[in-house]
């Protein structure tokens, strides 16, 4: 009986041991020693991850815990895979590496049977660094600056941050990064990530004294070309922040300046402005007017440009008459202008003048502007000059086209004055005392524009030479006598246009032309050299 009982107990103990071994879990670090199992195949009966859902930070590594049954099963009997290896990678030992923000499913699957289990892994991307657009700034009291924070990497899960100041009495900061200086001193502004990473950036703020005033040793300097001069600046208050200055010139062709020292070099004629500006951001500046004088009066040439200097060496600007000829000089640089239209005032009236390729005012712009629909014809009985005007789109009839020498009425029979409309009368027309005029255009009543009178109608070689020579002075019985070419010009172009007849000593925009000499045929008879009939 005792032996039988002992056998039963041994059998029971063995059975329990077998049952315990059959349910023992196998970890991912289980031995892959298969000695003693040669010739037999172990089939996996169960796979279970200890944690079905795990969360990591990018860069973390870990070994997954998985229970594999039966106990005889080894790692060679299963395989691990990741649904997104860019987020989480896994090897066949269950070692994982969290790579980037996202989620992935890790699967542990038996090789020979359809048994598997999964683990869901979420990878969060923490903030790795915070940067500010400035690491140090200097501000004057009450001035502001906006800091801008950048969170890295761009795919961090929580990209929130917060601004704080180390000393609100010196500088404050808003939630949007606006820093405002309060009082003199230093403070740090921090931008800290709120994801718990502890990452932050800082900017040192210095609240400093501003330059309130700059004084130069000279505010006006006149020197001849080739001279030098040293400007000196003094800044206030004496304890101001950054008392450096920089000098600028408005025209380096006139005066050059050393931007650091303020030394001036007079290199060309004209005017310029030197500006001395504080570099501490206060915006304070002061100006010095500079005039570079020519060494002698008259024309001055430099780099293909022409200027004209007065007796004191200063340049002429705008419109100027030099030896009876008008020129136009740039109002800022003094450079003579060529091939340009300019509005100028002469005798208190505005005109639009053209200055030709030599810089001289053109006395005849007829070909330049072409034939116009209407003109304004003016007759000055005081100077015996006719001036034709074309219309400017902006200011009306202010473009002097051409001037004509004429003869108006003598004192006993003056030319009618006023404003009238012109009308053609005829190419030949009897005047008085059996004499004739060419290209006759009516001013009013018997007052006409016409050539100097002829002895015979149609005979172009019968002009009165003595009367023709009176062009340029009062000589007619009230009509306005002209050269043949000028009478024809008015006859051909001005019918329907307005004519104004007046007497004034005011300066005119065009010169009074010289009278061409007549060609004598015999006695007092001859012909006008401007007559198209005698043009070769």
Image (cartoon, grey):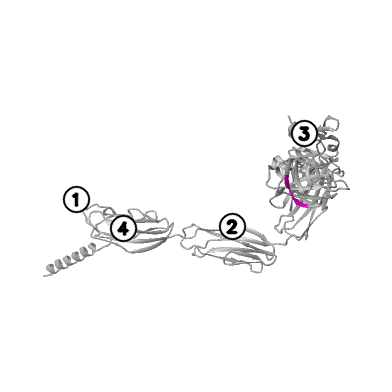
Q: Is 414 one of the magenta-colored residues?
A: no
Circle 3 crowding by C-alpha within 10 Å: few under 14, some 14–19, many from 20: some
- Left or right of 28? Residue 194 is right
Q: Residue at x 72, y 43 (%)?
A: 340
Of helix, strand and loop, which mostly describes the magenta segment? strand
Residue occupying the far right of the picture: 412
Of the pair 238 and 114, the residue shown nearer to us:
238
Mark 2 lies on residue: 133
Circle 2 crowding by C-alpha within 10 Å: few under 14, some 14–19, many from 20: few
Q: Which mark is residue 460?
A: 3
Q: Is residue 376 visible?
A: yes
Question: Can you say whether 404 is above or below 24 in the image?
Answer: above
- Left or right of 51? Residue 153 is right
Q: CA distance from mark 3 to mark 1?
A: 143 Å
Q: Is residue 262 visible?
A: no
Mark 1 lies on residue: 39
Q: Earlier in the sequence, mark 4 or mark 3?
A: 4
Q: CA distance from mark 1 to mark 2?
A: 70 Å
Of the pair 467 and 140, the residue shown nearer to us:
467
């Amino acid at each position: 009986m005792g032996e039988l009982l002992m056998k039963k107990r041994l059998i029971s103990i063995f059975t329990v041991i077998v049952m315990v071994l059959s349910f023992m879990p196998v970890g991912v670090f289980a031995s892959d020693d298969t000695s003693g199992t040669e010739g037999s195949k172990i089939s996996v009966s169960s796979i279970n991850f200890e944690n079905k859902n795990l969360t990591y930070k990018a860069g973390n590594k870990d070994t997954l815990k998985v229970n594999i049954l039966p106990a005889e099963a080894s790692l060679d009997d299963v395989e691990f895979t990741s649904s997104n290896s860019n987020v989480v990678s896994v090897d066949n030992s269950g070692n994982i590496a969290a790579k980037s923000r996202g989620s992935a499913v890790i699967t542990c699957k038996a090789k020979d049977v359809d048994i598997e289990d999964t683990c869901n892994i979420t990878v969060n991307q923490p903030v790795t660094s915070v940067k500010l657009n400035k690491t140090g700034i200097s501000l004057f009291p009450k001035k502001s600056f906006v800091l801008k924070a950048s969170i890295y990497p761009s795919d961090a899960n929580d990209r929130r941050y917060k601004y704080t100041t180390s000393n609100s009495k010196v500088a404050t900061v808003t939630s949007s990064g606006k820093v405002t200086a309060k009082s003199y001193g230093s403070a740090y502004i921090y931008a800290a990530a709120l994801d718990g990473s502890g990452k932050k950036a800082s900017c040192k703020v210095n609240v400093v004294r501003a330059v309130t005033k700059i004084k130069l040793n000279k505010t006006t300097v006149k020197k001849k070309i080739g001279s030098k001069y040293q400007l000196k600046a003094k800044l206030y208050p004496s304890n101001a922040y950054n008392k450096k200055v920089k000098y600028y010139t408005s025209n380096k062709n006139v005066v050059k300046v050393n931007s650091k020292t303020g030394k001036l070099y007079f290199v060309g004629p004209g005017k310029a402005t030197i500006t001395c500006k504080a570099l501490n951001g206060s915006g304070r500046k002061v100006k010095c007017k500079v005039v570079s004088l020519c060494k002698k009066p008259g024309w001055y040439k430099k780099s293909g440009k022409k200027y004209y200097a007065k007796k004191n060496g200063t340049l002429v600007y705008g419109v100027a008459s030099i030896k009876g000829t008008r020129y136009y000089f740039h109002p800022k640089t003094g450079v003579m202008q060529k091939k340009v239209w300019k509005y100028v005032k002469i005798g208190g009236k505005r005109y639009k003048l053209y200055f030709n390729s030599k810089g001289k005012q053109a006395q005849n712009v007829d070909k330049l502007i072409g034939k116009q629909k209407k003109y304004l014809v003016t007759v000055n009985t005081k100077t015996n000059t006719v001036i034709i005007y074309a219309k400017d789109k902006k200011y009306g009839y202010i473009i002097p086209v051409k001037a004509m020498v004429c003869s108006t009425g003598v004192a006993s029979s003056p030319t009618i004055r006023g404003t009238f409309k012109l009308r053609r009368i005829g190419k030949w027309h009897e005047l008085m005392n059996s004499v004739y005029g060419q290209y006759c255009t009516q001013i009013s009543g018997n007052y006409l524009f016409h050539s100097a009178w002829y002895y015979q109608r149609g005979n172009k070689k019968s002009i009165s030479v003595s009367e023709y020579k009176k062009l340029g002075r009062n000589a007619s019985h009230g009509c306005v006598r002209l050269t043949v070419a000028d009478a024809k010009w008015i006859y051909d172009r001005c019918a329907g246009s307005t004519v104004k007849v007046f007497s004034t000593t005011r300066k005119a925009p065009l010169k009074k032309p010289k009278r061409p000499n007549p060609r004598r045929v015999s006695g007092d008879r001859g012909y006008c050299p401007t007559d198209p009939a005698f043009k070769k």
